[in-house]
Amino acid sequence: MRGISLSRFLIDQQWQSEAIPSDLRLLIEVVARAIKAISINVGKGALAGVLGEAGTGNVQGEAQKKLDVIANEILLEANEWGGHLAAMASEEMEGPHSIPHRYPKGEYLLLFDPLDGSSNIDVNVSVGTIFSVLRCPEGCPADEKAFLQKGSSQVCAGFAVFGPSTVLVLTLGQGVHAFTLDREVGSFVLTQERIRIPEETREFAINMSNQRFWEPPVRRYVEELLAGKTGPRGKDFNMRWVGSMVADVFRILTRGGIFLYPRDTKDPGKPGRLRLMYEANPMAFIIEQAGGAATTGTGRILDVAPTELHQRVPVILGSRKEVQLVSGYHG
Ligand code: AFP
């Protein structure tokens, strides 16, 4: 289906299924507007002097890129005044960002990774924005505790990939849809409706340089893939690793595959690299809504009870049968 703008799509959904309350619809529109602004900044690259390090670090001790900081500010400013949010949380900020007193407050909580894959910015490879929307528990202050809800409580999740084109992927719990930014008109247009991930695949994504740190189930799984036609899987597999989860997940939504950032022994203090609240949960929600599966290896990502805003988890997601196989190896 072509020519349907994001705004019209959301209004249609609101009338058809009442799945979207009007304040959630407006919230998504504001997030999409912020994503457009981020896309414009990313697209300017060296011309606008936005590449390179910001000279600061985030709460997790990672060096921030200038565009990490710019994208974070764009999302905060765009979403502060709409009246839909109780608070926001971001990879780039230690604690929740309260809505300033001068603005009305709403019932939703917004979490985001403003620029996923930011180490790819300077080499002109796809990056993106990931977001998740939760409901603020009634009668509770919008503090860190309010955010610590299981991924299965998400009311909406999405991500944008700033690649050759800018694509916004969205779920409200009734399937997954993708919208491509029409740069001339300035609006997102529906380009893929009810995306379904093929159950089987011949493609996997993992950072092979971590191989010596993996646990036995992942070692076994990848060894079997690498053995190809003559191994137990009886077919050859291809490998892709962009280093921007948004691009790897978009590929899996488009043509299937499996993505693994498993638990490893590289840093015993970290049970994985990816962050639960604003990377793993929104991606797991999207992948499940597209018919795929998402696990930590030992359990469904969406069932992980969070204990910290910036908690990390192992992530294995994609084509259902492959994910089930790796989970099976974990026992
Ligand atoms: P950055 O946003 O810090 O570049 O991290 C990106 C990311 O969280 C995710 O998008 C990638 O899949 C993963 O890290 C790549 O990690 P490696 O550099 O260890 O392969």
Image (cartoon, rainbow, N blue to C red):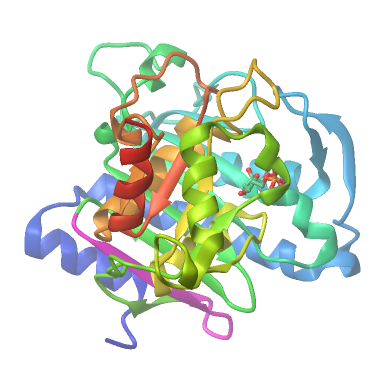
In the rendered structure, the answer to whether residue 211 lies left or right of residue 227 reads: right
In the rendered structure, the answer to whether residue 203 lies left or right of residue 16 reads: right
User: What residue is drawn where x is 17% and y is 69%?
Assistant: 12
Of residue 30 and residue 306, the one placed in the foreground of this image is: 306
Query: Could you say where residue 7 lies in the image, as x and y percent from the top left?
Result: 33, 68
Highlighted range, magenta? 174-187
In the rendered structure, the answer to whether residue 70 lies left or right of residue 93 reads: right
* Residue 85 magenta: no
User: Where 285 sits versus 64, above or below?
Assistant: below
User: What residue is drawn where x is 44% and y is 44%?
Assistant: 316
Query: Could you say where residue 275 lies in the image, as x and y percent from the top left?
Result: 54, 32
User: What residue is drawn where x is 67% and y is 65%?
Assistant: 126
User: Where 13 sits versus 306, above or below?
Assistant: below
User: Where 139 sits versus 96, above or below?
Assistant: above
Query: Could you say where residue 161 lies in the image, as x and y percent from the top left?
Result: 56, 64
User: What residue is drawn where x is 34% and y is 25%?
Assistant: 304
Of residue 43 and residue 247, the one placed in the foreground of this image is: 247
Q: Is residue 26 visible?
A: no
Q: If the image is split into quadrants, where does the C terminus sit?
A: top left
Q: Residue furthest front?
A: 230
Q: Is residue 219 visible?
A: yes
